[in-house]
Image (cartoon, coloured by chain):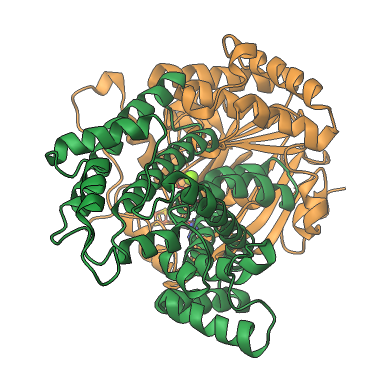
Chain colours: A orange, B green
Amino acid sequence: MATTQAGIAPRPDQAGVTPLLEVENLQVEFRTRDGVAKAVNGVSYTLHEGETLAVLGESGSGKSVTAQAIMGILDSPPGFVTGGAVRFRGQDLLALPDDERRAYRGRSISMIFQDALSALNPVFPVGWQIAEMFRVHEGLSKKDAKQRAVELMEQVRIPAARERAGDYPHQFSGGMRQRIMIAMAIALDPDVLIADEPTTALDVTVQAQIMQLLADLQRERNMGLILITHDLGVVADVADKIEVMYSGRIMEQAPVHDIYAAPAHPYTKGLLESIPRVDLKGQELSAIKGLPPNLTNIPAGCEFRPRCPYARDICKEQRPPLAEVVPGRFSACHFAQEVLEGDIEPAQQ
Amino acid sequence: MGRYVARRLLQMIPVVIGTTFIIYALVWALPGDPFAGRCGARPCPAAYVAEMTDKYNLDDPLPIAYIQYLGNLIRGDFGETFQGLSVGEELLRAYPTTVKLALVAIVFEILIGIGAGILAGLRRGSYIDNLVLVSTLVVVSIPVFVIGSVLQLFLGMRWGIFPATVGSDDSLYNLILPGFVLAALSLAYVARLTRTSLAENRRADYVRTAVAKGLPQRRVIGIHTMRNSLIPVITFIGADFGALLGGAIVTEGIFNVPGVGNLIFRSVTSRDGVMVTGAVTVLVLVFLLVNLLVDLIYGWLDPRISHG
Ligand SMILES: Nc1ncnc2c1ncn2[C@@H]1O[C@H](COP(=O)(O)OP(=O)(O)OP(=O)(O)O)[C@@H](O)[C@H]1O
Ligand code: SF4
Ligand SMILES: [Mg+2]
């Protein structure tokens, strides 16, 4: 079923199987007073059932905007999808009229957000907000919907679920609120769950519990999970593959263990080196120096060049496409092979 | 909740005593002979002066006289005017008219104010949005008595659509024009408040969640966005209702509405101290009670506010 647009080759991984979700050459821009910010510039990825895809990248790299475009919840205006396709089981969602597209939200693709306190409606009880999914989508009675909501709250391990269903979001702890978000998102048993930095706002111990919960739910329900984060440490245990985003583009895509063993892009390498490691305690973190490019005016050549220790002359002139380095691994760097093999010296400057 | 209400009611006692004492003191401490001009061109007969002085405890020091007055008030006795009219009865006659007028005004605020605010807020920058912005600005910048007189002249006298004055017949129909004039300023404010609040909430994270839940647009706006947006608006309208129940001296004056505003105005000009103190006491009480009610409604609308 997967129709391919001219010029874009199908991904070699799991060729022949229609992916659950296929994002192809997605482009999003924000038309603001300060100019047109090109937030997403040709992102492509695929997600299969039961698979966990981690999307990594610094703040402003376009992770959330990509997810919002997939969900169809961009702030528009100023945000517009200007190109590409988002195919769910082969159906391009971007080509659908609004009301048909709506049928996919919550039922086929769901999303949870970083800040559950502001993402939940402050004036309705949490049980009501979960039950709303059943009332609106499945036409259940108030009573039955409430019952299902309580069951979901139990599934996401909220203590005393029945008693607490009438409480309001502000009466819960951060971790419990995120569980409520999760319960709401999985209510209709969606095929894809997008989690946009679900643990960033939480304490470390709570972070681990939420990640565990997500991993369990995903396994039980065989969901495809897109996990957005800027914390490489979080994804190591749960993700199958990683997309590294920078300046609205994918810089590297690879199975998680390969990336940890040896990155094929200088940006990934920089990110990995910035993780605090126990064995390096006391030493200075080597966070990547410099800032990402201004999205209203992305310079020609490689977007990472101003910050890249390996940059050469060609990097200024030609933008490296995302290309396969070794089977199953993709990198958008002119020297991907060399970086992967550790066979390149920083440029002298 | 019960304790909160009890505490608020207790807090009202000193406020009521304080305000009524100030009014009482101001009214009776005014310089000049309280009996001047009471008995036609001649000075009042000594017997009358003695009787009145005794009736209103005018010989006692102010605090003592006030305490006696307060004692009567608590027993529900508002006293009599110099002419022998019962203050309580006069208030009972005037108050329903003021309440009716306030209700008419509130209906305008809700229907037109919220309505225009929603239309404008949902379509920022549209023709209707600009229309609302400009017309509310115009209303806000014109004094009430000008709006009132102009509407009275055209709608009332020239075109005869509504009665120009109310007089003794305070039917709802007669109160439409004065009610609208009374509402005008708040109505403009309600429209702007609704518009801003709605526009702000439309961008809120929880609205995005509602969209992500796959809810239909009308539910996203009609239930999730609206419920939050209207909290400050309803609170404002509630507080405004409290203020309107205090009587509207200007509007009641223009349209000759027989309400408390008119009553107070007449009593002040005729230096009828008993009537003024009585009326103001009632107004203070009503204002405090309505405000308590508004706070309770606010807490009910926004669960984040707790009245512990
Ligand atoms: N509502 C908006 N209006 C204008 N520009 C926006 C808007 N939302 C996002 N952008 C632009 O899109 C860019 C990418 O934003 P995005 O939220 O996707 O970043 P992110 O990768 O999720 O970062 P973070 O880790 O901080 O969440 C931002 O730098 C910003 O310029
Ligand atoms: S293309 Fe050049 S500048 Fe860009 S990441 Fe590779 S080496 Fe660095
Ligand atoms: Mg983000």
Q: Nearer the viewer, residue B244 or A265?
A: B244
User: Compared with residue B285, is residue A86 higher up or lower down, i.e. above or below?
Assistant: below
Left or right? Give the position of B4 relative to A128: left
Q: Which residue occupies the extreme top position in the image?
A: A160
Residue A17: image quadrant is top right
Which quarter of the rendered picture does the C terminus of chain A lie within? bottom left
Residue sitting at 55 percent across and 50 percent down?
B230
Q: Which residue occupies the extreme right position in the image?
A: A1
Counting every numbered tag in the picture gives 0
Ligand 2 lies in quarter: bottom left
Q: Nearer the viewer, residue B205 or B242?
A: B242
Q: Position of residue B48 (x, y in %)?
A: 26, 52
Residue sitting at 49 percent across and 52 percent down?
B241
Q: Position of residue A55 (x, y in %)?
A: 54, 40
Q: Position of residue A339 (x, y in %)?
A: 42, 44
User: Compared with residue A263, is residue A247 higher up or lower down, i.e. above or below?
Assistant: below
Q: Nearer the viewer, residue B35 or B134?
A: B35
Q: Which residue occupies the extreme bottom position in the image?
A: B158
Residue A220: image quadrant is top right
Q: Position of residue B62 (x, y in %)?
A: 14, 41
Visible residue check, residue A302:
no
